[in-house]
Image (cartoon, grey):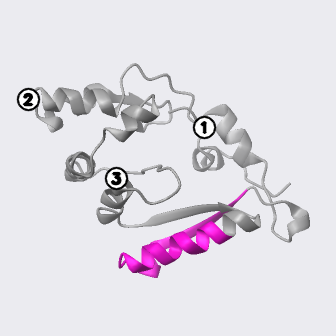
Amino acid sequence: STALRLRPERTIIDALAAEAEGYELDDILDEFLLSHPDGFKVLAAPRQPAEADSVTPGEIARLLDVLRARGAWVVIDTHEGLSDVSRAALEATDHVLAVATADRPSLVNLKRYLGMLEELGLSQANVSVVLNKSETDTGIPYSRDVTRSINLGVPLLVRTTRGVSATPA
């Protein structure tokens, strides 16, 4: 929600709390989704790290089941690393986009992450790598449109489909 410039009043924590009070997640979920001007919805992440630690893999699995039953495309932005919650999300995923930058530490971590995905049994055909924020002197072109899209809160894909091209700078 931060990168999309959305100001959530409620987050995934609130949705899960309502479920814990006895409400059916499928019946109440729309109340917790933020609408983006470009026509998609966002379930905001917890505000505080301690709140994030309270989310369980089972809760993530139930939430993803509800969203997938609606036939929705679900994009999950996880933190780096592979926690139990991330594993639960990976078990329900069809495709992983692994994001790295073109510096040595990031690429080393990417290699480790890809190895963990392989150990989890994820097919290489279902994994794509996105090399983010690379500069021209590293031999890989860089588009400042990525940073602009984050600062504007408009996903790059939406910007490019509206006629604003993502050309390397």
Q: Indicate which disc, 2 or 3, sits on the residue closer to the N terminus.
A: 2
Q: Callout 3: helix, strand or loop? A: helix
Question: Which stretch is magenta?
Answer: 108-132
Which residue is at 36% across, 63% downward?
90
Q: Quadrant of residue 2?
A: top right
Depth check, front residue: 17 or 44:
17
Quarter the C terminus occupies: bottom right
x, y (%) of residue 32? Answer: 31, 28
Q: Quadrant of residue 135?
A: bottom right
Which residue is at 46% across, 65% downward?
96
Q: Answer whether residue 116 is magenta in the image.
A: yes
Residue type highlighted by circle 1: Val
x, y (%) of residue 81? Answer: 50, 58
Which residue is at 36% across, 23% downward?
10
Q: Is residue 81 shown above or below 8?
A: below
Tell me how far mark 2 sits from mark 1, CA to CA.
Answer: 36 Å
Q: Callout 2: helix, strand or loop? A: loop
Which residue is at 28% across, 26% downward?
14
Depth check, front residue: 161 or 1:
1
How many numbered marks appear?
Answer: 3
Nearer mark to the viewer, of 2 and 3 = 3
* Residue wearing tag 3: 85
Q: Answer whether residue 131 is magenta in the image.
A: yes
x, y (%) of residue 108? Answer: 66, 71
